[in-house]
Every structure is written in C-alpha cells, then in structure tokens.
Amino acid sequence: MADGSDDIQALVGLMARLPGLGPRSARRIVLHLIRKRAGQMSQLAGLLDRVAVNSRECVTCGNITDRDECAICTDPARATGELCVVQDVADLWAMERGRAFGGRYHVLGGTLSALDEIGPDDLGIPALIDRVEREKIREVILALNATVDGQTTAHYIADALADSGAAVTVLAQGVPIGGELDYLDDGTISAALRARRRL
Amino acid sequence: MADGSDDIQALVGLMARLPGLGPRSARRIVLHLIRKRAGQMSQLAGLLDRVAVNSRECVTCGNITDRDECAICTDPARATGELCVVQDVADLWAMERGRAFGGRYHVLGGTLSALDEIGPDDLGIPALIDRVEREKIREVILALNATVDGQTTAHYIADALADSGAAVTVLAQGVPIGGELDYLDDGTISAALRARRRL
C-alpha cells in the first residue's frame, strides 16, 4: 500500500468506523499514535485488550463492570432505597459525574419504541418491577431523556409501578445551568415557566 | 470507580487525549466498543499493538512503513527522477490519495521556524540535497503548505538546490475544485487572478 503499511491502513479503517470519527480524524489519530508509539500506543492496545476481555454487564443493574456485580451495586453505603432508572450506561455515567445521587441504578438499555419494535420485555421492565419489590425500593427516579420515546417509557414504567408502593419521580425540566433564554427552545421555556417556584 | 471499572476509566482517559477527541467523544467510543467487543475491540487492540511494534520511518524518505524502506521507495515504477518534498507523512498520504504523482517523496518532518528554533539541519535539508544529487533527480516538487513557514521553507530549499541541476517547482495556487468565490479569502482570489490562464 502507498499509504503506509497494510496494518496502518487497516487501523485507520477501523478507527474511521468509530462513532464521531471519519477517515480524516482517524488518519490524524493514527499518525499521532505512531509518533508517540513508545508510550501511548502500546498502553492503548493493552487497555483495549483487557477491557475487551473483562468487561461485562452487572447482573443486577446493567452497568458495565469487570466483575459480576458493579461497584455501585456492591457498595453498602448506596443501599438507600432509591433506584434511578436510566436509558443506558452513558446516562448512568453522566448521573455519577453530577455526584448528586447516592442510590443505585437500573439500566434499561433502550426505550420503548413502536417503530423499532422494542417492547417492555426487551427492556427488562418486568425484571425492574421484580427488583423494586424485592429490594423494597422507596423511590424510583426516572432519569430518562426528554424525548418522545423517553417520556413514553417513563409513563409506561410509572403505570407498571403504580401498585408497588414505591414513589415514582422524574427529573425536573427547566432552564439548564448557565442557559441563556434567547438560545433555548420554546418547549424548554414553557416547561420552566409551568414549573416556576418562589425565590 | 463509579464509572465502570478502573480499566475502562483509564481507557476513556487515554482516548480523550487523542487529537480531536475529548472526554465526551472518548466515552462514546469506549461504550460503542464495549457493546461490540467480540469483534472490533480485540481487532483494534491487535492492530494497535502490531503497528506500535512494527512501524518505523523509511530510511530513504521518512514515510511510515513496517520495513526499512517503504513501498514507494522500493517500487521500481516510481523511479521517475521526480521527487516531491512534503512537510509530513499526513501530506504524503494526501498526495497519494490524489493519485496524480508517480515519483518518490521526501518527508521533511516540519518546516523552518525561527520561533520554534527549527533550522535546516533539524529538517534534514542537507540530506535532501545529497539525495537529489545521488539519485540524479530531474525535478523537485515542493508540495509544502501555503503558510508563511511553509513558503519560507520552500524558498530556502529552492535556494539550496539552485546549483543542483534539478528543476524546482511548487504546486499551483488558485481556486480549489468546487470552490465558490464568495467563500474564498482575498489572498486565494488574488493568487488565482495572477496565475490566470487562457481557456
């Protein structure tokens, strides 16, 4: 091959298929790595291999972990009776970065979707209801995306949990911190106005 | 760690330091890879490791290769007496994608820069002059960036090769293919006007 060796071309091709990358950014990354190969590249290869071999879903919550149960599910300090339902692991990570939630999680792995034929059983919603009863959860916090599918899923779960005795709550909607009204969509402004509170 | 295992966090951290990526895109890529780990992730780890171990600079031109001399330098069909001087390997790859050049390359690895204290010896310009004489090069094409440092380097090399007997040429400057005048900078329009030709 004219563009470096076949391995380099294969590496660029594989990188270019990663989300958010394309041929140009993949080439840039591969050339950057080759220049620093002594350190970063072998380290990256080793970590990728270890994570590929070891990572799996937590049997309880669906978080990604290298053990059977993740660090959150096995942390006794987090047995608060609060369960936060998220769409996927990226959302769980985002909640954890916020450092505001001290309970445990349940990862759905998607949202209900008639178009994609994803029903309650595909998302493990029956398992969630079992878990709420078994662990005597007091509050289920639905931290789902503010999209049509996310909100449909939230309403479905709230209905399914109506007889469980657990309180079902959702995240507040409103103006994001640092948000400027002029740049917000009309829906957000309306939601923030309806949910206004005394200062 | 709350965000997955320590290995996953280390992988995200390493990915986030790659050019063009940040914490958010690195998390997205790592989660994508974990979901597909059976295939892509091990393959990526294996390729990174192989490229880290095998890739090195071609001893003749500076291209990246997995042998002592790259495929371009060892291809007898490319011994055309034309030598294209580029700033770095990314530029060599870009020229090859254009498929318009059938000769060989010389990678400088940078440009002359008084600010960064990069002089002719740091770029191997004496070695380039030796090579032009040794290989009896007829034409040296300076395919350097149209920046101040790139053009300074081009003029320096042209002066140094003045007595070599090789013709020294540069890439044409003008309107890029598909370019719209309204979106071009003034310098490009002026250059294209000065270099106008009969239709």
Image (cartoon, coloured by chain):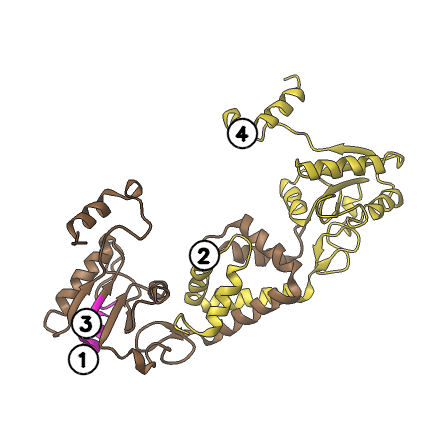
Chain colours: A yellow, B brown
For residue B89, side relative to residue A52 (left or right): left
For residue B157, side relative to residue B62 (left or right): left
Labelled disc at residue B136: 1
User: CB atoms at circles 1 and 4 under 8 Å apart?
Assistant: no
Residue drawn where x is 41% and y is 72% of the image:
A4
The residues bearing labels 3 and 1 have C-alpha atoms spaced at a distance of 9 Å
The residues bearing labels 4 and 2 have C-alpha atoms spaced at a distance of 31 Å
Q: Secondary structure at mark 1?
A: loop
Of tags 4 and 3, the one toward the viewer is 3
Name the amino acid type tagged 4: Gly
Residue B98 at x, y percent in the picture: 34, 64
Q: Are marks 2 and 1 on the same chain?
A: no
Q: Which residues are magenta?
A: B121-141
Q: Quadrant of residue B189?
A: top left
Name the amino acid type tagged 3: Glu
Magenta region includes residue B140: yes
Name the amino acid type tagged 2: Ser
Residues B130 and B95: in front is B95
Q: Which residue is mark 2?
A: A25
Residue closest to the far left: B163
Residue B18 at x, y percent in the picture: 48, 57
Q: Secondary structure at mark 4?
A: loop
Of tags 1 and 4, the one toward the viewer is 1
Q: Secondary structure at mark 2?
A: helix
User: CB atoms at circles 4 and 3 under 8 Å apart?
Assistant: no
Residue drawn where x is 15% and y is 65% of the image:
B158
The residues bearing labels 1 and 4 have C-alpha atoms spaced at a distance of 65 Å
Q: Which residue is mark 4?
A: A179
What chain does mark 1 sit on? B
